Every structure is written in structure tokens, then in C-alpha cells.
Amino acid sequence: MAIKRYIADADTTITNAFKANLQTRGVSGNMGQSDILEIFSIYAQATTSSGELERVLIKFPATGTTADYISYDRSQNDIPASGSVSFYLRLFNAKHSQTTPKDFNLIVSAVSRTWDEGLGLDMEDYSDKDAANWITASMDGATPTKWTSAGGDYYTDSSSSFTASFDTGFEDIELDITPLVEQWVNSAGNTLGSKSNYGVGIHLKGNEEDALKSYYTKRFFARGSQFFFKRPYIEARWDSSKKDNRGNFYYSSSLAPAADNLNTIYLYNYVRGQLKNIPAIGTGNILVSVYSGSADNSTPSGSKLVLSIGGNVVSPDNFNITGGYVSTGIYSASFAFTGSTSLTKLFDVWHTASVQYFTGTIAPENLTQTWSGQMYNPNQHYVSKITNLKPFYSNSNTNTRLRLYARRKDWSPNIYTVASEDAPIDLVEDAYYKVIRASDGWAAIPYGTGSDNHTRLSYDVSGTYFDLDMSLLKPDNAYIIKFIYYLNNQYAEQSEEFTFRIE
């Protein structure tokens, strides 16, 4: 699971626009309970030089001591440490019948003081008087606390202020605000310091708010919207894929770049069905040594094999790989193997200087014979299937592991192979999933093929898999899972579709 969403817990629109009489401004109007958020700049509506503005305030559950707060989820290792995760602000365009501006910029800036959402609804005549509004940030009993500057108080430094650009005007907001979120949660090692979480304000860029023309009107869905997937949220994205080469371990080849000659293997320490850290190792390093087999290849035999420097092989004696901590109960080690290609089985022993924790097996293949040095450019096609997909899931299933079986379409077994062997599993090393709503094709979880690779699949000796958080999906709907593979330096969407329902 490499996606978590944090739905806004407060939002409102504030304005200094004129009421319908074009004489009185609605600066005391509050719209905290509206299901729409609105931003505009209107020029010369009341007089030849009058200006009217509308801005948005939104707050998210960044800091708290219970589930579904960013800081709490990090403390529970549900999201990675700072530097290994990105946070995106997501707001969704709301269609309307009025003029929508185009070719403009919205500024997203951290709010610098506390504010109240309010109970107002009226977005036409601004008749619901409450805080927050254009003049007042919050109410302390019957005493209003005013903004220092009418229209809201905001940070303007580069770590707290961001720009979203719009060409047609109908775009959504998908904006990386990672530096600000890390300040809100005061993450360890964060060199930017900390800021109190008062959310963000969204408004037109200064020269557009002050322009001698109108930018009327941009609308987004608010947190009270009936549309489940269009509520404002912050999305945490990170690459949680684990590429365990135990099932596709290759000898080093002169035809492969150094990075492709490295193999990574994993140790999964399950205790009573749960991943647990090895007590003596914790989050520290663990050593791995490689042995050849006995005469019948049933146990490690002889001395440790000499390994080439590279990956996690750093010791001058070249006998040990210095493995490391990945996540709770999971450790990994990366190395290249240049030993005799006559070996059909290797044994990896995970240990400290005095204690052995685990012995695994590896069946190495010759990279040159398997993939490299082709006399033609292969056009790879695959047959794909999710082997353990159920027809129904509860949206309380937050970590559902799904297994993908893939084999090349040109696999052509003979009669003996069909009778005596299982169909081969081909590991697609760069595969991604998306989830769409069956009724209308809405991408509930789009492909994460960008810099964060947040929907990339993992693989191990049993094949390819991914963890799907069903709580991201609205109940009482059917959904379709699709895959895209990165092959021959291009993305190829697979034709198969896999349907299930959330109850």
C-alpha cells in the first residue's frame, strides 16, 4: 500500500464581493457548510474601478494522536519517513453555468493563524454571518479575532507557498506541497523547521487579483460534497514496491550494465503470522553470506563464496553482504554474483557474527542465455490474471494483497511440459495498477507511473503482487483493476480487466 488520503476536516470560502444591491460588501459572510469552494476576481461590477475577490481556506488532519492523522500514521510506520514520501494537494473542478477563467494561476499558501470553518451556506447574497470571513478569522466566545490583513494571513516563503497553473480553467489541482506538510508534522531531520497546521489559503495570483479585468469564476468541490472521490484531500504517495530477485536471480553478465547485474534478496521475519523485527537486529544491519550446495544440493556446503565489491558488498574480505532494514520484519541485501555458472543452487545465510537467523535457497540463471544477446527486437505480449481476487470486499480491508500471474503470450509447451510442469511465471519487473469505477470509468486510483511510482507492483519468489487499500474506494460500487507494463522503453496497457465490488 503506497497511497494514503487525508480528507479535509475544515473548509470555507471568504469574500469581499458586493451583495446583490451592489452597494454592500459581504465581508461578514461565511460559507463553511457549502459543498462548493469558489475563487474569483471581479473588476468594475459596482463602479468603474471596483474590485471584488473570493478566496478559499482548507485545513487537513496533519497533526494528531489518533488514526488518520499524518503525524500519527508516520509514528506507526504506516507512511515512510521524511524524504521517502510526497504529499499532494488534490482539489477537483466543479462544473457550473457561469464564465470560467482560463490561462491563470492560483497561489496555495499556508495560513498563519487559526480560523473557524463556520456554519454559513449562502454563496449568493452572503447573508450567513459567521467566522471565518473576509474580516474575522475566528470567534473566541462572542469576541471576534480579526485577520491582521483582510482576506487572510498567509506565509509567503517558498517552502509554504506554491503555484497551480490553469490553461483551460477546467483543470483539477494536483500540487506537490511536501515541504509544507513536513513542517506541519515537524518531521525528524526536517531542515525547514515547523509550522502550526492552520491549513492553506487558495487565491488568484496577486497581479491577477489586481488586474483590470475579471477572472470569474473557478469552483471546486468542498469536503461536504456528495461526490465521494471529489472531496479535497492530501494524498501521501511513495514507492513501496519490493523487487525480490530470489525468483529471478541472474549471474553477472558483461552484456548488462553494473546496476542490472545486482540482485536483491529479502528476508521476511514472520512471528505467529505477523512481521516482527529480529530483536537483536532491530532496524540495524544484518550480514548475509552465500554458499554452494552439498552433493545433493540440500544444505550449504564448504566455505563462504567470494563476492564482488558492489551493491551491499563493501567489506574488503568480500565474504559478507551487509544487509539492511526495509520495514517492520523485512530486511534486504543486494549483490552481484560472478561465481561458477555450473552451480544450480546457492544458499543465502542471514546472520550476525555469532548467530544464524535464516537460510534460503536461490536457483541462479544465466542472464545472457535467458534475455540478452537477441538476434531480433522482441515484441513482448503477456497474458495476465489476478489469481486470488474475490468478488466482494469490505472497505474496512485496508491492506488486501492481490497476486498477479503473468506469462508471455508466445509460451508454447509440448505435451510433456503440459503433463508434468506448472505454467511458468514471468516476472514483469515494471508493472503498475489502476482502479476505475465500473459505472462511469472514474479513475479512483490512477496509474502511479510518475516520479513517486506509488502504484508499482512488487515481486518475490512466488510472483508479482500489490497491496490495495479498499478504504480508498466508495462502498456499494463495482470497480475494475487494470495493469500497465513498462516494456521495451514504453508503457503498454494490458487488455485484461478484473472486476470486484466494495460492500
Image (cartoon, rainbow, N blue to C red):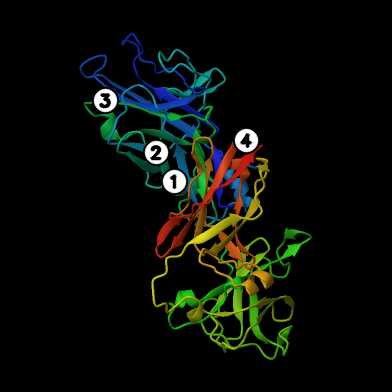
Determine the CA span between mark 3 and mark 2.
20 Å
Q: Which residue is mark 1?
A: 177
245 above or below 479?
A: below
On the question of residue 63 being in view, the answer is no
Please state which amino acid type lies under the numbered disc 4: Pro
Between label 3 and label 4, give the one nearer the viewer: 4
- CA gap, disc 3 and disc 4: 41 Å
Q: CA distance from mark 1 to mark 3?
A: 28 Å
Do callouts 2 and 1 mark residues in contact (Cβ within 8 Å)?
yes
Instruction: Determine whether 246 is above or below 84 in the image.
Output: below
Q: Disc 2 and disc 4: Cα gap in Å?
A: 32 Å
Q: SS of the residue at dot 2? A: strand
**What's the amino acid at mark 1?**
Ile
**Residue where numbered disc 2 is placed:** 108
Q: Residues within 10 Å of mark 4 (few under 14, many from 20)?
A: some
Residue highlighted by disc 4: 475
